[in-house]
Amino acid sequence: MKSKEIKIAITAILAIIIIYFGIVFLKGLKLFSTDNIYYVEMKNVGGLNKADIVVSNGMSIGMVKNITYDPHRQTLAVAVELNEGFTLPRGSHANITKEMLGSPKLNIILGTNPDDMLNIGDTIYGEAGSDLMSAAGDMLPKLQQIMPRLDSIVTAINTITNDPALMTALHNMQYISDNLRTTTDDVNSLLAHDVPQLIGKADGIMTNLEQTTNQIQSIDIASLANDATSTLKKANQTMEQLQGITARIDNPNSSIGKMLNDPSVYNHLDSTMANASRLLEDLRLNPKRYVHFSLFGKAGK
């Protein structure tokens, strides 16, 4: 009988031990403390509890070991036990993050200097932060104030969207957009085809102009000037001679002047031309009076 009682007692003790270790395991508590403890001073822990997870850069680095209240400073000291070998750089600070339906977590933002480390037991500053639910609760009063204005805005938008002028403006914008697209295509075509041809022609013109300039530079300007001067002198001499001839023609006492200015000379020449015309006409009509041919000797008149 006593052996059965001993077995029952041993079984009960083992069950208690298993239950205890199971609870400790599920809550994430450590059976053996590492004494790698730091403190976070906060005004509000935001629902953080003992055994909650401590994370850094998205990785679990420890757990909340204890939370105590300092009545003199009116602050909360959160004791965090970090994993063995994990230390905090100086300048680190903490905040509390909370998922929509999850428990809060203490998030430690590490300092930037890995060579300057805090001592175990040092204190860093922390803040509660905000979660989605509290942020939504803070926004509700503002949303209630905005709702009447939002209703007016929606009404105004409906009025604008139902205005036929808006559709006309949209069609005009489409028309303008199509024209801009066509213009852009024309400009691209111009840049792709016509402009290179114009540039090629301009290059040819510049080359010809350069050649012409070189040819002009090679011309003996002084020689051309001398030739032009000589030509002008000869032209002046010719003009002087023409003026002398004109003067002689205009002079009634000169031979040419008498011939051109005396009416009797004109009349005599006119009479002579008339007689010559009559003689040629008579010669045509009566050639035997002036020319006689005989094959057998002289015939009598």
Image: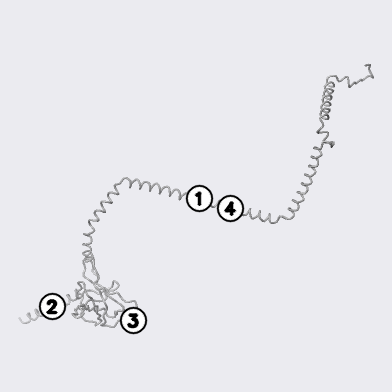
Mark 1 lies on a secondary structure that is helix
- Marks 4 and 1 sit apart, C-alpha to C-alpha, by 16 Å
- Marks 2 and 1 sit apart, C-alpha to C-alpha, by 92 Å
Q: Earlier in the sequence, mark 4 or mark 2?
A: 2
Q: Earlier in the sequence, mark 4 or mark 1?
A: 1
- In the image, taking residue 240 as reference, residue 10 lies left or right, namely left
| Residue type highlighted by circle 2 | Ile
Please provide percent x and percent y for residue 25. 19, 75
Please provide percent x and percent y for residue 216. 68, 54
Q: Earlier in the sequence, mark 2 or mark 1?
A: 2
- Marks 2 and 3 sit apart, C-alpha to C-alpha, by 46 Å
| Residue type highlighted by circle 1 | Leu
- In the image, taking residue 8 as reference, residue 158 lies left or right, namely right
Q: Earlier in the sequence, mark 1 or mark 3?
A: 3
- Marks 3 and 4 sit apart, C-alpha to C-alpha, by 72 Å
Q: Residue at x 82, y 31 (%)?
A: 262
Q: Which residue is mark 4?
A: 202
Mark 3 lies on a secondary structure that is loop
Q: Which residue is mark 3?
A: 116
| Above-or-below relation of 55 to 173 | below
Q: Which residue is mark 1?
A: 190
Query: Which numbered disc covers residue 16?
Result: 2
